Image (cartoon, rainbow, N blue to C red):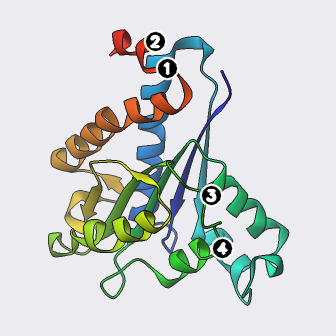
Amino acid sequence: MSNISLVAVSGSLHSPSKTTVLSRVLLERFAEALERALGPEAAVDTRLIELSEIGREFSGALTRDELSPAAEEAIRTIEQATLLIVASPVYRASFTGLFKHVFDFVGQYALIDKPVLLAATGGSDRHALIIEHQFRPLFSFFQALTLPIGVYGSDADFVDYRIDSPALAERITQAVQRGAPVVIGQVRPVSSYISSW
């Protein structure tokens, strides 16, 4: 079995960040679920790309060949992921501009049929529809396979940059339970893993 690459992209421009916390937890939970389901033969690699750290590498670039080596590496990591977890804080009713700028460099056909988990954070529950109104259309353009359950967390769901809400924790569990079989199906025939669930 080839390596399974789980890649999360946090579109937050700040550190520490609730969006990055949510991204990291989703990444860890997916890795745990896949390792349990696939057993010791699984080689699950995880990578968290924080735009608060690498974002300046994209500044000034208008075309992909103008990207710095670090930015190009990040784009290639996104394109080669087995599972992509994308998250952004709500900023002026959408994802951050830097988040969109980064994905403007991703190859138009690089994410076809790639499982993508959508996640976002915002000041209140009123912003939760960002997942349906902003994220899904973007990744539909890429012909990616957006997973059925997105994960949204409001400020009230966190305490000291820790997830403190049972409802959010349950949503994360649901997203992983529904999404993990899709990811496994990308790397292993369906009949060989049904019994493990």
Q: Position of residue 66 (x, y in %)?
A: 82, 81
Badge 1 or badge 3: first in the primary sequence = 3
Q: Which amino acid lies under the numbered mark 2 shown in the image of this protein?
A: Ser
Badge 4 or badge 2: first in the primary sequence = 4
Q: Which amino acid lies under the numbered mark 1 shown in the image of this protein?
A: Pro
For the residues labelled 4 and 2, the Cα–Cα distance comes to: 36 Å
The correct choice, above or below, for 14 with respect to 34 in the image is below
- What kind of element bears circle 3? loop
Q: Say which residue label 2 marks.
A: 192
Q: Residue at x 26, y 60 (%)?
A: 153
The correct choice, above or below, for 174 with respect to 47 in the image is above
For the residues labelled 3 and 2, the Cα–Cα distance comes to: 27 Å
Badge 4 or badge 3: first in the primary sequence = 4
- What kind of element bears circle 4? loop
- What kind of element bears circle 1? loop
For the residues labelled 2 and 1, the Cα–Cα distance comes to: 6 Å
Q: Position of residue 183 (x, y in %)?
A: 46, 35
For the residues labelled 4 and 1, the Cα–Cα distance comes to: 32 Å
Badge 4 or badge 1: first in the primary sequence = 4
User: Which mark identifies residue 105?
Assistant: 4
Q: Residues within 10 Å of mark 4 (few under 14, many from 20)?
A: some
Q: Which amino acid lies under the numbered mark 4 shown in the image of this protein?
A: Phe
The correct choice, above or below, for 123 with respect to 83 in the image is below
Q: Say which residue label 1 marks.
A: 189
For the residues labelled 4 and 3, the Cα–Cα distance comes to: 11 Å
User: Which mark identifies residue 110?
Assistant: 3
Cβ atoms at labels 2 and 1 below 8 Å apart: yes
Q: Quadrant of the C terminus?
A: top left
Q: Residues within 10 Å of mark 1 (few under 14, many from 20)?
A: few
Q: Which amino acid lies under the numbered mark 3 shown in the image of this protein?
A: Ala
